[in-house]
Image (cartoon, rainbow, N blue to C red):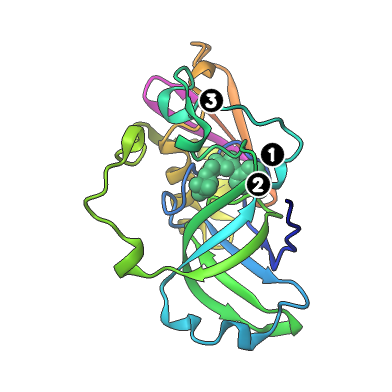
């Protein structure tokens, strides 16, 4: 049996590549995105009642993992990339059906210019992600405060201090919502997005990720990340 599902929307997010994206929703509250509904699903009445919910579930396609073969065991970054767990014990994008699940904050709905868009924050989604479904997050059923969290019992530790070089500070100051962007960058980098094996002890190595329309560049010295530039 196979099923063909048509995306109901597409995500426009600041994350233009996989590297550096938060590993779960909510970790970077300043990660804002728009979910544009696609025809024929762009009907305002399909969202009737949603405004009463602060959060929604999104099911989506890991579209940049399509074409990569799944394996029964994966190495979650959470375990330093060197211990394996079963794919069904993980949130890995590389699964038999590459479908993702994220609970994100719903900030509002915008209906201007003939487009219907849901305004979201705290996303862990790549720009261009196709969304299969939207459901309200129902606190009484979906939140299980005493649940056990296996090998991911707590959030990743924000173990790095993040500093901005003078150049990066100047570049940041020229941006819209410089404070919000600065906080987003700190949230993204404080958890040290490098894969565990990348800590090769080369202090001059420059890392980069594409965010919005710029390249964010940084280097690592001990427990400090220095943001070099936004260019
Ligand atoms: N909350 C989701 C995603 C967890 S995996 C779930 O549990 O199913 C999170 C990682 O997925 C991110 O770090 C990012 O690198 C990757 N990712 C996000 N959107 C993606 C996409 N459209 N295609 C492939 N990988 C994606």
For label 1, being within 8 Å of ligand 1 is answered yes
Determine contact: label 1, label 2, CB under 8 Å.
yes
Residue closest to the eye, 75 or 5: 5
Instruction: Give the alpha-carbon distance from disc 3 to disc 2, as whole Å.
Output: 18 Å
Q: Quadrant of the C terminus?
A: top right
Q: Which residue is mark 2?
A: 62
Determine contact: label 1, label 3, CB under 8 Å.
no
The x, y position of residue 176, in whole percent, is 58, 62
> Is disc 1 surrounded by few (<14), some (14 to 19) or many (20+) residues within 10 Å?
some
Checking the image for residue 73, the label placed there is 3
Q: Nearer the viewer, mark 1 or mark 3?
A: 3
Where ligand 1 lies, by quadrant?
top right
| Quadrant housing residue 161 | top left
- Residue lying farthest left? 146
Q: Is residue 211 left or right of residue 179?
A: right
Where disc 2 sits, the SS reads loop
| Quadrant housing residue 141 | bottom left
- Residue lying farthest front? 1
- Residue lying farthest top? 201
Q: Earlier in the sequence, mark 1 or mark 3?
A: 1
- Residue visible at 67% across and 53% down in the picture: 127
Checking the image for residue 20, the label placed there is none
- Residue visible at 51% across and 70% down in the picture: 135
């Amino acid at each position: 049996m196979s099923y063909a599902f048509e995306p109901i929307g597409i995500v426009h997010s600041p994350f233009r590549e996989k590297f550096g994206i938060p590993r779960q929703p909510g970790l970077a509250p300043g990660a804002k995105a728009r979910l544009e509904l696609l025809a024929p699903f762009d009907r305002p009445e399909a969202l009737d009642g949603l405004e009463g919910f602060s959060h929604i579930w999104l099911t989506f396609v890991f579209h940049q993992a399509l074409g990569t073969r799944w394996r029964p065991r994966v190495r979650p970054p959470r375990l330093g990339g060197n211990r394996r767990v079963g794919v069904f014990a993980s949130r890995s994008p590389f699964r038999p059906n590459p479908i993702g699940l994220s609970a994100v904050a719903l900030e509002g709905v915008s209906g201007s210019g003939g487009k219907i868009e849901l305004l979201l924050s705290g996303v862990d989604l790549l720009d261009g992600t196709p969304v299969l479904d939207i459901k309200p997050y129902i606190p009484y059923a979906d939140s299980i405060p005493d649940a056990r969290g296996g090998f991911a019992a707590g959030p990743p530790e924000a173990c790095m201090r993040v500093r901005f070089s003078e150049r990066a500070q100047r570049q940041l100051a020229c941006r819209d919502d410089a404070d919000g962007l600065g906080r987003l960058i700190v949230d993204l980098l404080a958890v040290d997005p490098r894969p565990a094996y990348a800590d090769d002890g080369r202090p001059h190595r420059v890392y980069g990720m594409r965010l919005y329309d710029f390249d964010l560049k940084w280097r690592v010295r001990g427990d400090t990340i220095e943001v070099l530039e936004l260019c």
